Amino acid sequence: MDYINLLPLSVVQKLEEAGIPQDSRIFYQNDRWVYVVGQFIHSNKKYHCQELDSLGPFGVHSVDISFVLSSSKFEYSINKIGQKQLIDGEQIIGSHAPISPITLEKFARSTANIPDEATHFCWLYPPSGAFNHVASNLDSSYELDLLRIGGFAYFIADDNAAKNLRLIRVNSLVLSATNGLTFESPSHWREEYTDQLWAQNRFQPVTLPSLRKRGAHYFAFINPYELLTTGNDNASWMPSQHGAFVYLFNEDHSPHLFDCFFSVADNCLGVSPSDEQRRKY
């Protein structure tokens, strides 16, 4: 058992004056003193988390994938990837965020490789199951990027009816900043909105090694102008204008000091896909 030392009385007085709760755990991390309220620290893993100071940019590339959406379960089932048609029992299943209207415009839209005619989109989480049975048959690494990182599906609303959506493109995120999505600086996540999203299966395990190394365990995509509620009262919150990725650090999804979200920026600094193509010739 670790030896517990008493804080000097002068420090205790300052803590009481500042209103730091008595059930706080105080520790030194990332060159500063921090505290966590009401959490029992089971292991040293909490001490080794690193605060996320930035996200992306991510490259964005179209992929050759066909899938079927199950809107009632917010799941997608891939039935064709690359040149391989998947038979019964081979389908790759993952979760997706609710379908939402597109809000990015002009250069930001072009940089994110969003089709001009697209009206709606949804985030595709990386599949939860194994996909080794198709990995060796893929001609493009971009399809593998979608399976490992995730991506966006884009739709067009036929006859201006949002219920009649037709898939026109799937883009994967790639770890490249040549062109793609950029994000604003991190914002603190409001813990009271976690449980409702968790109950909806919106939080999925983090798959990017760089984020897992920093201690992030779960992530979710929040849609543009999505109004979140706590489920217990009339409180509501709209985190982002163009969508955002949320990251949770505790394995039991309880609040953590470093829980945060990154909003999609509308001033993308990458190179538009059309310009990138011209550079190749």
Image (cartoon, helix red, strand yellow):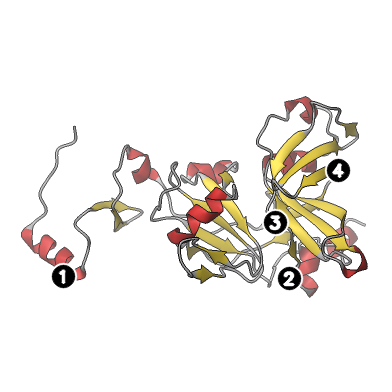
The amino acid type, in three-letter code, at marker 1 is Glu
Against 57, residue 254 (above or below) is above
Query: Is 73 situated above or below 189?
Result: above
Q: Amino acid at mark 2?
A: Thr
Measuring from the top left, give residue 44's x and y in whole percent.
Answer: 32, 39
Residue labelled with disc 1: 17
Q: Residue at x 74, y 58 (%)?
A: 99
The foreground one among 273 and 94 is 94
Query: Where residue 72 appears, x then y in whole percent?
Result: 72, 48
Ranked by sequence position, the earlier of labels 3 and 4 is 4
Q: Position of residue 70 (x, y in %)?
A: 76, 45
Q: Earlier in the sequence, mark 3 or mark 1?
A: 1
Q: CA distance from mark 4 to mark 2?
A: 24 Å
Residue 53 shows up from this direction: no
Give the mark nearest the N terminus, 4 or 2.
Answer: 4
Residue closer to the observer: 236 or 129? 236
Q: Secondary structure at mark 2?
A: loop
Q: Are marks 3 and 4 in contact (CB under 8 Å)?
A: no
Q: Nearer the viewer, mark 3 or mark 2?
A: 3
Q: Which residue is mark 4?
A: 66
